[in-house]
Image (tube, coloured by chain):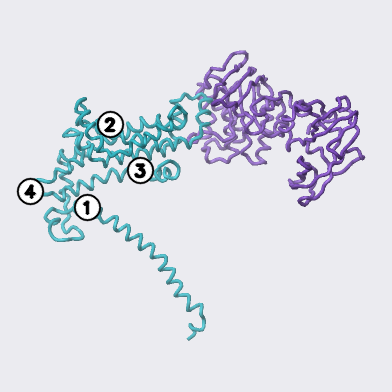
């Protein structure tokens, strides 16, 4: 009775309920979204911890018997773990070569005007538009004839073709953000170019270098076609090794899932380390 | 150490940026490069520093041709209008960096860096990074880095322009002191006549890529060689009137006629352009000795204790600078008065033919 006499007290519970729902709905949508994103990852992790019999058996949401056999096999069998080592080796090599080549090139594009500079800059990017598979045959034939076939350098160099243009493009954006007067002041102070570049300039664009390294790393890490075709045994990447799990006794699901989980880890680590740079890079540079 | 430019020209893609500049700068006083934006001040400074090569002409330092000597070997220091410091180095390392590269002993570096920082009033900030300082402090750091070394040539390209009014005044005073103590050639570029007057020394007026007048600052101020100089070296620019001298009678426009003042009496009869500084136009006719001109108020800007009245008179527009606060409405009729003794006279080619004699002693 008294409640009805005061319209404000009657309305109050309704409106707080309204705001609560309005606040929860986006949260719920977000949770669902994250759930869908994580589901395949979870499934992969679940499978990697299950024995094969359980995977192909009944549908389960979580492993009934947790086993680390799959992981132990990968870390003890050299035919497995060398796949990871090979991949990390050529990916690291590729990132270093790409940066070493792209840094001076990007500096030239950002600081000097020369004949055809704008065309060249665009032409570099068009390199990136071709699918890697197009270059499969020429690379294969070329590397066979110069003896680069089945080496880490072969894969690293092949990936460089795709990474350098992107690296130049990203770094140029960061470098152009540094005023030219900075270079001139350094020369006036008596810095030589290499010393200025390493001591003054590189720290200024460290975020850009981080972002570039990340993109080079990720491209090279996930690229399968070139890496598999240009290697046979000595430099065989993990992704190629994983295709071996089909044997006479059927598919080794658990082992494959464990290898998949381990393949995700380096990428996740790199993202973790450069996440702040990436955020800055998206805001500042050309990414 | 003397800096001499001989017939310096700079063309970029066929476009003239600097045209045949001859100039000598002496140590012990500041040479102020005065000109509007785009007059070629920065371009000329970059040529002096060696950051750009002139298209033709020679640059001499103490009679030694340095035109083709690279920047690093020239002992030049430069302060830009943007605050340029090395963001990754501390203030201490910023100031010390030219000394470190000159291979000076650690003890000596430390002494000089601290002394210079103290003088620039950033002694307590040496451990910070440039990004953690205010704009004024950043520019002080840039100046300290330029001053700490034994540069033969110190170039300052509108160093105070990006600072707020108060800081600018204070730094300008500091600079006066520093310039007096130094035995290097100092070139200071600015768009502001007031800076040229306070920093003293000599003034070189640039206009559209040419050096139009160079001499001791008071001399240039009181005898601007041409209409162009009178416009640059006066803030607001000097007001110009078309007028005539006819047998000792001076007329400005159709209405104002007066007996020609002493300094104009010897000029031959004919048409002239007369100039008067905005501060020399008045709203009252003291002693009935002033010429009256009428016009309409376009706008009256009140700037603190002064009022700038923009007056339109037919085709001509003038600015009258008067003491005190005066309110005017748009389009109000106004009568302004000019002391004929204060008139500059320019001939038809824009060259100065007579300057007011009485203007010489006071330096405002």
Q: Residue at x 42, y 68 (%)?
A: A20
Residue B50 percent across, percent down from the top left:
56, 22
- Asked if marks 1 and 4 touch (Cβ < 8 Å), the reply is no
Question: Which residue is identified by label 1?
Answer: A44
Check the image and report above or below for A66 versus B206: below
Apparent colour of chain B: purple
Residue A251 showing in the rendered view: yes
CA distance for labels 3 and 2: 25 Å
Mark nearest the camera among 2 and 4 is 2
- Image quadrant of residue A131? top left
- Image quadrant of residue B193? top right
Residue A273 shows which numbered tag?
A: 3
The first of marks 2 and 4 along the sequence is: 2
Question: Which residue is identified by label 2?
Answer: A157
The first of marks 3 and 1 along the sequence is: 1
Residue in the foreground of this view, choosing between B27 and B57? B57
Q: Residue at x 20, y 46 (%)?
A: A259
């Amino acid at each position: 009775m008294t409640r009805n006499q005061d319209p404000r007290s009657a309305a109050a519970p309704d409106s707080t309920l309204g705001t609560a729902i309005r606040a929860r709905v986006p949260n719920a949508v977000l949770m669902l979204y994250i759930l869908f994103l994580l589901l395949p990852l979870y499934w992969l992790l679940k499978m990697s911890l299950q024995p094969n019999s359980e995977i192909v058996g009944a549908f389960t949401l979580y492993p009934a018997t947790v086993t680390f056999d799959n992981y132990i096999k990968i870390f003890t069998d050299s035919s497995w773990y060398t796949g990871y080592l090979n991949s990390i080796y050529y990916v690291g090599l590729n990132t270093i070569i790409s940066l070493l080549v792209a840094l001076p090139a990007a500096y030239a594009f950002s600081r000097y005007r020369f004949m055809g500079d704008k065309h060249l800059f665009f032409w570099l990017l068009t390199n990136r538009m071709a699918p890697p598979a197009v270059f499969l045959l020429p690379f294969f034939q070329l590397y066979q004839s110069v003896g680069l076939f089945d080496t880490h350098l072969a894969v690293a160099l092949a990936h460089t073709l795709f990474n350098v243009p992107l690296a130049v493009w990203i770094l140029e954006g960061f470098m152009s953000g540094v005023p030219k007067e900075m270079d001139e002041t350094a020369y006036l102070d008596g810095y030589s170019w290499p010393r200025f570049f390493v001591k003054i300039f590189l720290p200024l664009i460290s975020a850009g270098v981080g972002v570039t390294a990340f993109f080079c790393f990720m491209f090279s890490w996930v690229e399968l076609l070139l890496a598999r075709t240009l290697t046979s045994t000595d430099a065989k990447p993990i992704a190629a090794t994983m295709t071996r799990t089909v044997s006479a006794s059927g598919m080794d699901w658990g082992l494959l899932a464990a290898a998949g989980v381990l393949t995700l880890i380096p990428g996740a680590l790199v993202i973790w380390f450069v996440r702040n740079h990436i955020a800055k890079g998206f805001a500042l540079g050309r990414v | 150490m003397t800096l001499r430019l001989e017939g310096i020209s700079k063309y970029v893609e066929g476009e003239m940026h600097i045209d045949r500049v001859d100039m000598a700068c002496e140590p012990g006083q500041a040479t102020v490069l005065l000109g509007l934006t785009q007059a070629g001040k920065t371009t000329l400074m970059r040529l002096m520093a060696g950051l750009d090569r002139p298209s033709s002409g020679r640059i001499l330092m103490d009679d030694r041709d340095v035109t083709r000597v690279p920047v690093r070997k020239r002992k030049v220091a430069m302060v830009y209008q943007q605050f340029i410091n090395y963001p990754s180095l501390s203030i201490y390392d910023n100031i010390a960096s030219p000394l470190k590269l000159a291979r000076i002993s650690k003890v000596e570096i430390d002494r000089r860096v601290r002394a210079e920082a103290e003088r620039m009033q950033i002694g307590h900030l040496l451990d910070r990074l440039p990004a953690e300082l205010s704009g004024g402090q950043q520019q002080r750091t840039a100046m300290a880095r330029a001053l700490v070394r034994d540069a033969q040539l110190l170039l300052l390209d509108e160093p105070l322009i990006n600072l707020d009014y108060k800081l600018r005044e204070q730094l300008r005073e500091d600079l006066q002191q520093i310039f007096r103590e130094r035995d290097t050639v100092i070139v200071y570029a600015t768009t502001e006549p007031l800076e040229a007057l306070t920093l003293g020394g000599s003034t070189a007026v640039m206009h559209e890529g040419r050096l139009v007048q160079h001499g001791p600052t008071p001399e240039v101020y009181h005898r601007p060689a041409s209409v162009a100089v009178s416009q640059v070296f006066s803030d607001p620019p000097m007001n110009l009137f078309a007028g005539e001298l006819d047998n000792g009678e001076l007329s400005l426009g159709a209405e104002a006629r007066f007996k020609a003042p002493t300094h104009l009496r010897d000029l031959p009869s004919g048409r002239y352009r007369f100039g008067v500084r905005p501060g020399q136009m008045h709203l009252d006719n003291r002693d009935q000795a002033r010429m009256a001109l009428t016009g309409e108020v376009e706008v009256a800007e009140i700037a603190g204790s002064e009022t700038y009245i923009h007056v339109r008179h037919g085709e001509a527009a003038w600015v009258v600078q008067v003491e005190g606060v005066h309110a005017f409405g748009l389009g109000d009729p106004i009568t302004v008065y000019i002391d004929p003794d204060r008139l500059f006279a320019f001939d038809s080619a824009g060259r100065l033919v007579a300057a007011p004699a009485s203007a010489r002693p006071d330096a405002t």
